[in-house]
Amino acid sequence: MRAADEMTGERAAEVAEQGRSGPRRPRWQRFDTWMALGFTALAVLVTIQLWIDPNGRVLAGNDDDHGIFLFMLAHAERVVFDGAAPFFSDRFNVPVGVNMMANTSILALAIPLAPITHFFGGGVTVALLVTAGLGGTAFAWYWVLSRHLVNTRAAAAIGGAWCGFAPAMVSHANGHVNFVSNYVLPFIVWQVLRLREPGRVWRGGIILGLLIVLQIFINEEALLFTAMTLGLMAAGYAAMAWSEAKLVWKHFCAGIGVAALTSGVLVAYPLWYQFFAPGNYHGQPFAPTDYVTDVASLGWFARQSLAGNAELTRVLSVSATEDNTFWGPVGLVMIVVATVMLWRSVALRATAIAALVVLLMSFGPELRIFGRDTGIPLPFGLISHIPVIDLVSVTRFAMVPAAVAGILLAFAADRAGSLSPKRRRLFWIGMVLALVPLIPKPLPVVQGDPMPEFITAGTWRQYVPEGKTLVTVPLPDVTSGRTGQRWATLNNLDYPTPRGYFMGPANPPWDDTGSWRAPHRYTSQLLWSVREYGYVPQLSEADKAAIAQDLAYWRAGVVVLVPESRNEAALRSVLVEALGEPQTVGGVEIWPIPSNG
């Protein structure tokens, strides 16, 4: 692509000049070091409240997803230290288990860090991954931009800072470990661009294929977004500059084929397991219209930005972890300015158009403005039910234009020197006014419920023999059973547990729609209702028999009432009526279940 070709040539000339002059190389290396330290410091600032007590605190923006990644890390710890199967967990959702490939299991990150999880706790690993995700993504983009695409380190620094700490990234840092760990994507993008070079078919294709495999085990959704965007870019470039595209398309496509073959061979079985093994699902537990990008959010501020206001942002965002745009009014203007400045470059024009198409997809099937659906249909409605697309949270498509915006700003900053003095001054004033309000604030946290001595001292082992489970009440579940899930995962799933928060089929085999929980049984529905509404039903003998049957199905060794749960007294009354009076052991009330129960 022309812009990349031009930048590569200029970069080669610069490197040659550095080789002749000598002193510049150490200066650039020092600059790189300072950028790495700066991005790390900013990432630590964003996560500082979690680092104060990583195993005791929980990310407040999305404590459910904080919990699900503790599960992923605990599973990986068992893979390394207990030889557990990497693609399936039998310690969660007993007796059915969980298809880990069908979940965001981040195996490429969780397995190498399993020793940290084992010796220091999953909370430390979460804090480390979020910090490394933000800082690492910023530095990865800075590296690719500074080495291959732009001429000034300052421009690369702007692009890296935006791509690593944009409102979308900081928003996902509230609980989505996978979506902040985007440091492989810049190298995938660069390897794809390099396939246009002669002689890169095999070497470049294999390298790209290996990077794709790595990214699959970090975040498939981000890989899908990247592949779609690169495909749109290539199509747009070919349409606008066919005379140049036809010179490279054969070896470019051949390199893509080699990459597909390389990655396909390596991930064929994991992907088969994901889509066809037990625990697979299709679609999401919500409609495509539920999680879409509000048009008004483009020019507003995210709740975690310096100029943000959480109360106002809630109207325009579906979740604290889904502020996927929120570039601010001046930021939006500067993105448009950068696009206009770069419009003459066919490659960058194709990039901007591709980002615009993906942004339009993020709006969903109908236009939403200021929190209200307008009824105006949009093109995404035509493709929302296509397999794989139907597994995506629609608003996350906006993460693509968010990243592209940083790249365009980097190129514009690189070329600002060619502007007249007046325009150059206005450009940099605009950049300051755009970037400063988007400086991220520290992520909010809450203190997690303390684990009782019954768990921390290992007393539970006396009541949970091999093949049995520890059943916490409330049962581990999305939203309503966070504490029980947290206890199990911070203990690296040493004891198996029924149910939990994970992705699986809603009610197999009759309904394989994706769900955030296991199908309800009589007891789980009963206890959920009691916790939610506080009423104490009269249990018939049939009800008690159904509870006993469910406990047997879950292979219960002991039932533990979580202290200070919502409507704890009502939950206790139901358990007493069904199971008798409890024992108090290690700071909790427990009901041992006889082996024949």
Image (cartoon, rainbow, N blue to C red):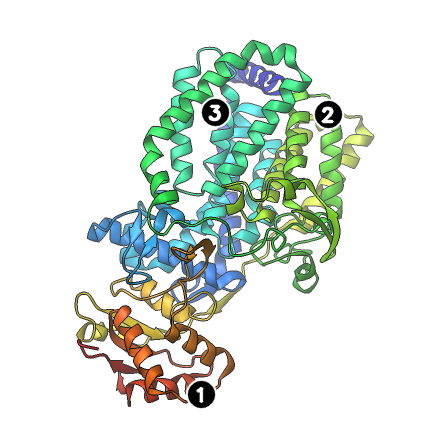
Image quadrant where residue 10 sits: top right
Dot placed on the residue nearer the N-terminal end, 2 or 1 = 2
The kind of residue tagged 1 is: Val
> What residue would you read off at disc 3?
191
- Local packing at callout 3 (Cα closer than 10 Å; few below 14, some 14-19, many 20+) is many
Q: Position of residue 182 (x, y in %)?
A: 48, 41
In the rendered view of the protein, which quadrant contains the N terminus? Answer: top right
Query: In the rendering, at what x and y percent does residue 41 appear?
Result: 50, 49
Give the quadrant of the C terminus. bottom left
**How far apart are labels 1 and 3 at the CA level?**
62 Å
Check residue 536 in the rendering and tell me which mark sits there, or answer none.
1
Q: Are marks 1 and 3 in contact (CB under 8 Å)?
A: no
Circle 1 packing at 10 Å, graded few (<14), some (14-19), many (20+), is some
Q: Amino acid at mark 2?
A: Trp
- Image quarter of residue 463: bottom left
Single out the residue that lies furthest toward the right: 422
Instruction: Determine which residue is flagged by label 2.
Output: 343
